[in-house]
Amino acid sequence: MTVSPDLDRRFRDAATTLGLIDVGFDVVDSPIGDLFVAASDRGLATISFDPDPEGKLEQLARIAGPRVLRSSRSVDLARRELDEYFQRRRKSFDLTVDLRGLPPFTVTVLEQLARVPYGETTTYGDLARRVGHPRAARAVGTVMNRNRIPIVLPCHRVVGSTGDLTGYAGGLDVKQTLLELEGAR
Amino acid sequence: MMQTVAIPPFERFYEEYRAEVLRLLRRKLGADRAEDAFQETFLRALRAYPRLDHGEHLRAWVLTIAQNVAVDTLRRARPTGELPDQGAKDAEPAYAELAELTDGLGAKERAAVVLRYGYDLSYEQIASALGSSPDAARQAASTGVRRIRRRISS
């Protein structure tokens, strides 16, 4: 006997509305492909260019608690803001982010990253200077590389000192697309 | 250090047991009432989930919750408070070892005894399955054991 989609959705909605989940996730479609999106009561916890939940649920449980549940409703806010961003109707995100479990240096770098304005680019070295560690460009690169919340924390706006795109978790073509969307290139 | 089974993310737990829970509830309540009871079962499980201290016996745990939700549903439907037959024929195979011993106990006492002594769950966990306090769970288990002792010795 299978659980009908309607009954399944009602349970997931009720669980979310009653505040009984630690983190909810769903797949959100976008012009750059399906995104895996997860949010806790503290804010957006994950955006991944790989929509497959496999392997991500355990990681979310470690960050936010074991009540990890697929729930369309829990990512409604993120879905709306991402839609607006991709339609060029939003230049900055109002979403809060959940950075639990990250080392202090990473959090500091991500906080500086969040201040890089829409449509502009900066370099790894510049970001390193802004966090007071001018020689830590490589470490900043690692933080960008492992950024749990790309797009919203705009690591696509960070490029090499010669202007090369250098790298991106979603692929260089996605980085290029996002910068073009913002009118940076 | 003893290795314990990790608690899975709730999504995996839900996907693994939802069909079986719905089957049990349909058998006990019929298709219509089973839907609300299904939702209630997994909401109760969600409420209790952060208090679990290991991931063992989750099947027995969630089926006990479902069983209790079914009993509550039937009790609400019967103004006299008469309980449905909780005979051993309804027991899930996992309960089988203790079924004979616990036959004749009330639903809560039986669940408490089985979860405590059959599955080695803590009173916290039993309380969450029964929707009661740890003290009440301890009380139910000890009353149950006392009754069994009395029956065996008589």
Image: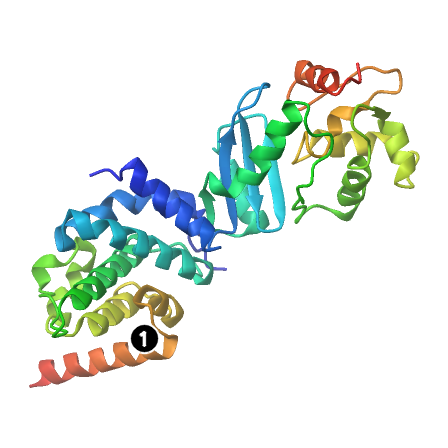
Residue B133 location in percent, x, y? 37, 75
Q: Which residue is mark 1?
A: B137
Q: Chain of mark 1?
A: B
Residue B56 location in percent, x, y? 36, 55
User: At x 88% / y 40%, what residue is drawn?
Assistant: A131
Q: Quadrant of residue A165?
A: top right
Q: Quadrant of residue A109?
A: top right
User: At x 21% / y 78%, what residue is drawn?
Assistant: B144
For badge 1, the amino acid type reads Ala
Residue B123 location in percent, x, y? 36, 72
Estimate how packed mark 1 is, as few (under 14), some (14 to 19) or many (20 or more) residues with alpha carbons within 10 Å. many
B122 to the left or right of A110: left
A177 to the left or right of B98: right
Q: How many marks?
A: 1
User: At x 11% / y 72%, what residue is drawn?
Assistant: B82
Q: Is residue B11 above or below residue B122?
A: above
For the C terminus of chain B, give its image quadrant: bottom left
Tell me if I can see residue A168 in this picture.
Answer: yes
Q: Is residue B81 above or below residue A84?
A: below
Tell me if I can see residue A136 in this picture.
Answer: no
Q: What SS does tag 1 mark?
A: helix
Q: Quadrant of residue A78?
A: top right
Q: Is residue B104 above or below residue A55?
A: below
Residue A157 location in percent, x, y? 78, 25
Please, which colouring scheme is shown?
Answer: rainbow
User: At x 42% / y 52%, what residue is drawn?
Assistant: B5
